[in-house]
Image (cartoon, rainbow, N blue to C red):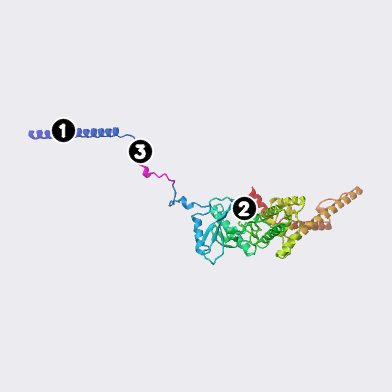
Amino acid sequence: MIADDISQKLEEFDLSDSDSNSDTEYEDETEYTRSNQASQFTVSKPLEKEDIVTKYADKIKTEPFKKGPQVTKDRAKRATVEQVLDARTLRFLGKIFRSGLITRINGCISTGKEANIYHGTHDDEESTEEFAVKIYKTSILVFKDRKRYVDGEFRFRNTKDQGNPRKMVKIWAEKEFRNLNRIYQSNVPCPKPYVIKSHVLVMEYLTEGDDQPSPKLKDYPFKGINDVNKYYHEMLICMRRLFQNCRLVHADLSEYNSIVHKDKLYIIDVSQSVEPDHPMALDFLRMDIKNVNDYFSRQNIDVYPEKSIFTFVTEPLGIEDSEEDLNAYLDSTPLKTTKDQEIEDEIFRSLHLVRSLKHLDERDFQKFSEGGVDTMRELVAPALPSEELTTATVDDNKEQDDNTSNSESDEESEKSDEDSSDDEEQAKPKGKKYEDKDEKKARKEATKLAKQEKRKTKMKKHVKKKLINKRKSGK
């Protein structure tokens, strides 16, 4: 038993010894790791900003974030030659070449504020036609006031994105093509239009031969006073035919936009031309008349008053549309020879012309309700039968009102005399309750007639509604 007890104690002693060894080993390991970590911390240094950027440069994107696929456009694709020829325009020219109309562009004929014109031909020897290729500027828009010539046009009422220059130029080119078509079909002298592709327009080239273009009116050498008078009459006849037959106002007519070709006056550059229904059509027409008169008056001839030309252009006149009849009418029109007529022209330019109720301003509604609007009917359009009837009824109403006012004043004077002579008589009781049946009947009849007269000059509901909406929108 004693031996067993001794062996057991020895075993317990060995176990305690092994535990102490393990503790010492663990302490040694922790000290080693701590020393390693300390050595690491002492060796490593904090990274600077440049090192961080260099380390993660391949992962940092400095470009702005955009959704969808990013398309990189080369500036060379949008570069233009002579402000009109870019890759997009060349594609439209390629389509015209493939159609077989023209095969060669020989050079630039002229440059303007809105387009460049190039000379085009066909390589076929049998073809003798020459073409003017008008390419509108899209990169640099010098002529930025296009919007007022398009807004208000019934033909372009559904056009949108007019703030986009490329789309606006396309609409502008289409407008000139359609105006040229209308003028050419009405037998008014102008270049023949052939085809249009976006902002590239191909039309007839007016030339005298030997690659010499026909001169503009400003460069034409007149042979004498009779020659000047001839082209002055031709210009006025063209203005009348544009208005009456083509339903157009040129809106920029001058010696720069007309060409003398084969001793005949041709009208060009009709991209800004508008219809007579345009809100500013009559203002544009007066501007054209002034430009034409100013040019021909500088050629030392007497011109017609602007008011007479306006009547000649806009009125039917009851004569045939032949040059003989139109020239005879112009010969019978008196010329402007005095300073008083010049003052009348200035007054005429400042007049507010009204063609319809749509063009009435707010200041005119009160006059219109009273029947006193000066619409310049003798200048703008003949009065309709309904308008004449309305005017007649208004005048009759005024006369009737004057008569009734005079009769009322007479009655008042008679009553005052009667009152002065019959002061002693007792006053009758006043009020509807005490009046006679005959007096009551007469009073009601008079009220009914007065309401009928008032309805004749009453403002129409649609006119009143338009005035109210205009005032609301103005606020």
Task: Name which quarter of the figure residue 193 lies in.
Answer: bottom right
Taking 30 as reference, is 271 left or right?
right
The mark that comes first in sequence, 2 or 1, is 1
Q: Is residue 31 above or below residue 407?
A: above
The magenta stretch is 50-64
Residue 213, image x, y percentages: 60, 58
Task: Name which quarter of the figure residue 203 lies in.
Answer: bottom right
Q: In the image shown, does 324 or 128 lie closer to the viewer?
A: 128
Residue drawn at x 85%, y 53% is 406
Tell me the amino acid under the disc marked 2. Arg
- Dot 3 falls on a residue whose secondary structure is helix
Front position among marks 2 and 1: 2
Taking 6 as reference, is 82 left or right?
right
Q: In the image shown, does 223 or 250 lie closer to the viewer?
A: 223
In this figure, what is the number of numbered marks? 3
- Dot 1 falls on a residue whose secondary structure is helix
What numbered label is drawn on residue 148?
2
Residue drawn at x 60%, y 53% is 147
Q: Which residue is mark 1?
A: 17
Residue 473, image x, y percentages: 63, 50
Residue drawn at x 82%, y 54% is 402
Tell me the amino acid under the disc marked 1. Asp
Q: Is residue 460 above or below residue 8?
A: below
What numbered label is drawn on residue 51?
3
The reply to whether the magenta stretch includes residue 61 is: yes
How crowded pointer 3 is (Cα within 10 Å; few <14, some 14-19, many 20+) is rated as: few
The reply to whether the magenta stretch includes residue 133 is: no
